Image: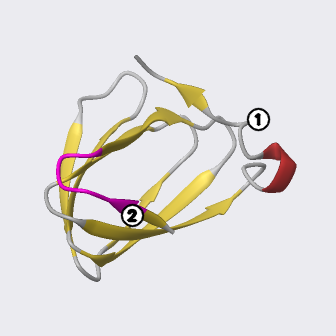
Amino acid sequence: MITFKKGSVRANHYHKATTQLNYLISGKILLRTQNPGESVVDTLMDRGDMTVTTPNESHALLAVEESELLVLTQGPRGGKEYESDTFRLE
């Protein structure tokens, strides 16, 4: 569970082997994604929306308003390995 204050930016990274499901419990979030060699895609998430980010897809989350997001992952990004598949972007 990730909580956001309005204007907060989270993520801004990608995973080489993890798929991530993002379910917006409350608020509004702008999800910005980009697959290698492709254009940036902006998705405005409203309460109840679910999005999926796939391996090697860069993603960043901007809170348009105070928000709560549930993130579920499939891959090595869990437990002690939480950061092993996270590659930060500038």
Q: Per the image, is 4 magenta?
A: yes
The answer to whether the residues at label 1 and label 2 have Cβ atoms under 8 Å apart is no
Looking at the image, which is closer to me, 4 or 90? Answer: 4
Q: Per the image, is 76 magenta?
A: no
Instruction: Give left or right: position of 45 versus 23.
Output: left
SS of the residue at dot 1?
Answer: loop
Q: Quadrant of residue 26?
A: bottom left
Q: Position of residue 40 (x, y in %)?
A: 24, 33
Residue 75: mark: none
Q: Position of residue 6 (x, y in %)?
A: 18, 55
Residue lying farthest to the right in this orientation: 80
Task: State the residue position of label 2.
Answer: 3
Looking at the image, which is closer to me, 12 or 32? Answer: 12
Q: Which residue corresponds to the image point at 63% horizontal and 61% vertical from the top-left?
A: 73
Q: Badge 2, how many Cα within 10 Å: few under 14, some, many 20+?
A: some
Instruction: Give left or right: position of 28 versus 50.
Output: left
Instruction: Give left or right: position of 12 versus 63.
Output: right
Between circles 1 and 2, the one closer to the viewer is 2
Residue lying farthest to the front in this orientation: 5
Q: Which residue corresponds to the image point at 14% horizontal and 56% vertical from the top-left?
A: 64
Amino acid bearing label 1: Ser
63 lies above or below 57? below
Residue lying farthest to the top in this orientation: 90
Residue 84: mark: 1
Q: Which residue corresponds to the image point at 45% horizontal and 22% vertical from the top-left?
A: 89
Amino acid bearing label 2: Thr
Colour pattern: secondary structure
Q: Which residue corresponds to the image point at 59% horizontal and 54% vertical from the top-left?
A: 19
SS of the residue at dot 2?
Answer: strand
Query: What separation in Å lies between label 1 and label 2 (alpha carbons)?
Result: 23 Å
Tell me the magenta residue range. Answer: 3-8
Instruction: Give left or right: position of 14 versus 29.
Output: right
